[in-house]
Amino acid sequence: MLPKKFILDLVTPDRRVLALEAEAAVLPGAEGSFGVRPGHHPLLAALQPGWMKVWHGSVREDFAISGGFAEVLPDRVNVLVSACERITEIDPQRAAQARERAIKRLKSRDPGVDRERAARALERARARLRAAGRRAPE
């Protein structure tokens, strides 16, 4: 018989964001979003900046995450990301400003601009804005 829940750990270098028993999760994989339920086959997946959804009890929590990795086991999911925030905590105006700064850096001809870093910042800002636009549960 398959378990009804799995342990979900969502961790950044600074803190443990979430540690609970969950019934399901959807993560933004580098190859596309994927769902996880109890009993999932083992998987190690690269994550891209995007929107992560977690169902536990009668609650759904949504997060904007940066890139990272997910280790999926039948009874546990470990999500390791460099940054994460609940979408209810995202300031859309601040995220839009970060997007504009990153675009400006990418368009700059200044040789001192770290283009790779600016591209990652743009990806993160876009993911935060997409997640913030989905504040109401589906």
Image: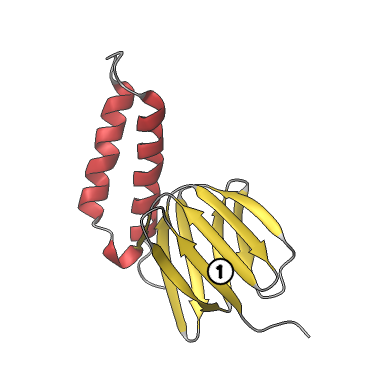
Disc 1 crowd rating (10 Å Cα; few below 14, some 14-19, many 20+) is many
* Left or right of residue 69: residue 124: left
Is 116 placed above or below 82 here? above
Instruction: Find numbered disc 1 in the image and state the secondary structure of the residue it sits on.
Output: strand
Residue marked by disc 1: 25
- State the scheme by which the image is colored: secondary structure
Residue 52: give x, y in percent of width and height. Answer: 48, 61
* Left or right of residue 132: residue 24: right
Residue 138 in view, yes or no: no
Residue 28: give x, y in percent of width and height. Answer: 54, 54
* Left or right of residue 1: residue 109: left
Outermost right residue: 1
The quadrant holding residue 36 is bottom right
Task: Determine the residue positioned at 67% across, 75% down.
Answer: 38
Task: Determine the residue positioned at 31% across, 31% down.
Answer: 103
Tally the numbered discs.
1
Residue 39 in view, yes or no: yes
* Left or right of residue 9: residue 90: left
Is 99 placed above or below 11 here? above
**Nearer to the camera, 135 or 46:** 46
Residue 42: give x, y in percent of width and height. Answer: 72, 61
Task: Determine the residue positioned at 27% across, 48% down.
Answer: 95
The quadrant holding residue 43 is bottom right
**Nearer to the camera, 43 or 129:** 43
Outermost front residue: 14
What's under tag 1, amino acid-wise? Ala
Residue 68: give x, y in percent of width and height. Answer: 51, 49
